[in-house]
């Protein structure tokens, strides 16, 4: 039996506080609906029976080095969604997002990213990425979703 191969991984976590219920937040964690609230987000659906995120859906997004391919690996409405993405730079990322009720009418969105490099180039890219860059991205995502939800509430 061959010895296990363990690539150096980086795991990062963040908890967002979204001003809506889990039932309102969950649908927004979909490549199609993400276009409404996350500036600059774009994607191309490759496979989805419903046209939106569902277990087994496959889509792709642009990446500075080519294309990132995604698979929806978990899909429990209002509770949890998971993705695996293979980036053009050789980094594979597992993303787990769990939603929980926080204070009245808000949701704690617990996000975990596990980054795995597939070769030396990917290892160097991962080593050069900083916790601050990732945290800034998570805060931008949180702020964008909350701002979009605020505008939607005002429009009602």
Image (cartoon, rainbow, N blue to C red):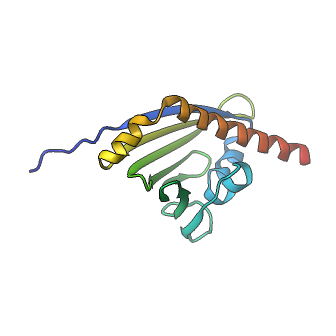
Query: Foreground: 125 or 103?
Result: 125
Residue 100 appears anywhere in the view: no
Task: Report x, y in % for residue 71.
Answer: 47, 59
Q: Nearer the viewer, residue 35 or 80?
A: 35
Q: Position of residue 61 (x, y in %)?
A: 55, 59
Lateral position of residue 146 relative to residue 114, left or right:
right
Q: Residue 153 is drawn in which quadrant? A: top right
Position of 77 compared to 150: left or right?
A: left
For the point 64% across and 58% down, the residue is 42
Against 30, residue 127 (above or below) is above
Residue 97 vs 133, above or below: the answer is: below
Which of the pair 90/103 is nearer the observer? Answer: 90
Residue drawn at (43%, 47%) of the image: 93
On the question of residue 34 being in view, the answer is yes
When the figure is inspected, residue 122 is found, relative to residue 50, above or below; the finding is: above
Quarter of the image for residue 50 reads bottom right
């Amino acid at each position: 039996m061959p010895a296990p191969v363990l690539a150096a991984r980086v795991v990062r976590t963040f908890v967002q506080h979204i001003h809506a219920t889990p039932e309102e937040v969950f649908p927004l964690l979909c490549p199609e609906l993400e276009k409404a609230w996350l500036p600059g987000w774009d994607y191309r659906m490759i496979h989805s029976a419903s046209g939106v995120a569902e277990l087994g859906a496959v889509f792709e997004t642009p990446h500075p080095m080519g294309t990132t391919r995604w698979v929806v690996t978990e899909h429990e409405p209002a509770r949890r969604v998971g993705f695996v993405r293979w980036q053009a730079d050789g980094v594979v990322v597992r993303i787990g997002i769990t939603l929980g009720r926080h204070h009245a009418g808000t949701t704690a969105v617990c996000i975990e990213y596990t980054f795995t490099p597939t070769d030396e180039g990917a290892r160097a890219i991962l080593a050069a990425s900083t916790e601050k860059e990732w945290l800034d991205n998570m805060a931008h995502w949180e702020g964008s979703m909350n701002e979009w939800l605020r505008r939607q509430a005002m429009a009602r």
